[in-house]
Each structure stands twice: as structure tokens, then as C-alpha cells.
Amino acid sequence: MSNHPIGAVACAVLAAMLFAVAAVAQQRAAAAVPEGESLVRSLVRNPRWLAGVVGDAGGYAMQVAALALGAVLLVQPILVSALVFALPLAARLNSRRITPRTWLTALTLTAALACFLLVGDPTEGNTSAPLHEWLLPLGFMLALIVGAVAGGIVAVDPARRALLLGAVSGSLYGLAAALTSYVTDLFEHGLLHVLGSWQTWALIAAGVTGVYLQQRAFQAGPLAASLPAVTIAEPLAAAFLGLTVLDEHFRTNTLGLVVTGLAVIVMCATTLALSRSQATAA
């Protein structure tokens, strides 16, 4: 990996901006689809949503470029700033004002997530963990996901529904992230190895379901109710699977673990606060 921090920062900021624009475009497109209509059919025919997909692709390309130029711990905290870019853009397009309290909450969430990534600094683990080691943690995680989806479906409050579905979507993205490295390595052994691995199909299922539920979250409520949940659930789910399945651990001391734990508490509290503020404003 080349070490060009200025280039890495520039690419990461551009990636965050593209992710933000993509999220805003997709949320506006999804929110315009009535509950009774087919969400997927409506979105694939919507130029705004397709433009959001292009924005996501550009964001991922810039993220890859940033990681090629600099360290993960430099790039990842910058990427979470997509939330700070997305909220004012969404507010402007929807003719809504962001209060100073909402700004403070969003910035606190972003700082807490960056702290979690920087202080925790997890090691790389055993990406080829056998299936039996996945069963209990994955079963626990899927039970929480099913419960959250059920709660999101029956929730009357749009902001609550968006929050729950956003959290599920982010969790599935975290599962996909935990599987990606292993599946990528399989390509060295040929396509048959890729297609014959359960991790490949689990990755595809998690990714596709995550995208669908994210659009459902976008349809259900405002961006500030869903995007923070997606943002924090992905690294938390990936960290949970890393610690319980992939034999990863945090490279920090006792004080660092305390700070990491406090960062998680702040992330959850600020996400709930943003969702409630949107419910009050709606």
C-alpha cells in the first residue's frame, strides 16, 4: 500500500460526499413511492434513484482509492462524515431547517463513531473460520435482525420504522463486510471455489437484503431517522462478528476499551436522539 496521506484524505472526503448525495437521492426516490406500490419496480424506473446508485458506485471507487493511498484508520473516520454532508443536503431539498441541537447531535455521533474506529483499532482475524464457529453468533445476530424487522413492520411512527429498518440494513452490511475478505481470497482458487462456498451466498444474501431494507427505511421516514442507524450498525455488527467468530481483538489498553465502550453508548444515544427529533418535527 502506498503512503500518500493527502491523496487518501482527498479521496476519502470525495467518497463521503458521493455517499451522502447517493443517500439523499435514494431516500427522496424511495419516499415518493406509496406504501401499496412495488418498491423495487418503482425504484428501478426512477432516474433519481439510479443516479443514487451511480453515486454509491463512485463513492466505493473513491473509498478503494483512498485505502490504496492511506491507512484504514485514516480513511474510515473520514467516511463517516457522509452523515454530516447528507443531513444539510436533505434538509435543503426538503425545505427544512436543521436546528443547532440536531447539528450538535449529528456531529457528536460522527465523532463517537470515529473514536470507536480509531481507539478500538481491531486486528485482522481468521477470515476462514469454519461454519460451526459462525452458528451461535450468527444465530443470535439474525434473531435480533428478525425482531427488528418485525418491529419496523408494525411500528406506527414513521421515524421509528425508519430507525429499525435502517439498523437492520446496517447490520446486514456489517455481516457482508465480515465475509468479504474471505470471498475475495477465494477468487485466487478459481470461480468454482467462489460459487461452492456458503460464504459467497451469505454475502450476496446479506448485501441484497441490506440494500432492499435500506430503501424501505428511506421510504418510511426522513433521512436523519434512518441514515444514522445504518451508519453505526454496520461497524458494530462487523466488530461483533470479528470478535466472536474471526478471532479479532481491539489493539488498545484498558482505558481504550472503556473509551470504546463509551463511544458505542454515545453512538446509540445520539442515533435515537436524531430519530426522535425527526419524529417531533414531522
Image (cartoon, rainbow, N blue to C red):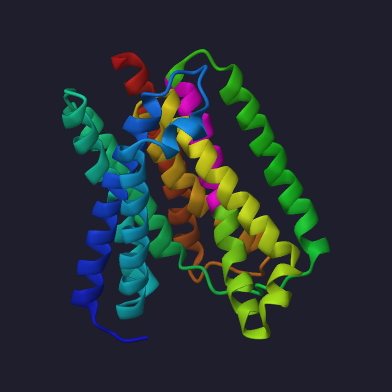
56, above or below 63, in the image: above
Q: Nearer the viewer, residue 19 or 242?
A: 19
Q: Write down the quadrant of residue 61 in the picture.
A: bottom left
The residue shown at (23%, 77%) is: 5
Residue 110 at x, y = what percent? 32, 48
Name the spot of residue 32 as percent of width and height, x first. Answer: 36, 24
What is the span of residues highlighted in magenta in the rendered image? Answer: 159-173
Which residue is most to the front?
A: 45
Picture quarter containing residue 102? top left
> From this viewpoint, is residue 239 visible?
no
Residue 230 lies in the magenta stretch:
no
Res. 161 visible in picture: yes
Residue 260 is situated, as x and y percent measured from the top left of the image, at 46, 55
Figure disc tally: 0
Residue at 64%, 38% (x, y): give it.
Answer: 145
Q: Residue furthest right?
A: 132
Is 83 left or right of 119, judged from the image as shown?
left
Q: Is residue 168 magenta?
A: yes
Above or below for 180 versus 192: above
Does the magenta stretch mainly form a helix, a strand or a loop? helix
Front-lying residue, 191 or 107: 191
Please provide percent x and percent y for residue 117: 41, 60
Image quadrant where residue 239 sits:
bottom right
Q: Residue at x 68, y 45 (%)?
A: 141
Q: Nearer the viewer, residue 36 or 27?
A: 36
Query: Which quarter of the rendered picture does the C terminus lie within?
Result: top left
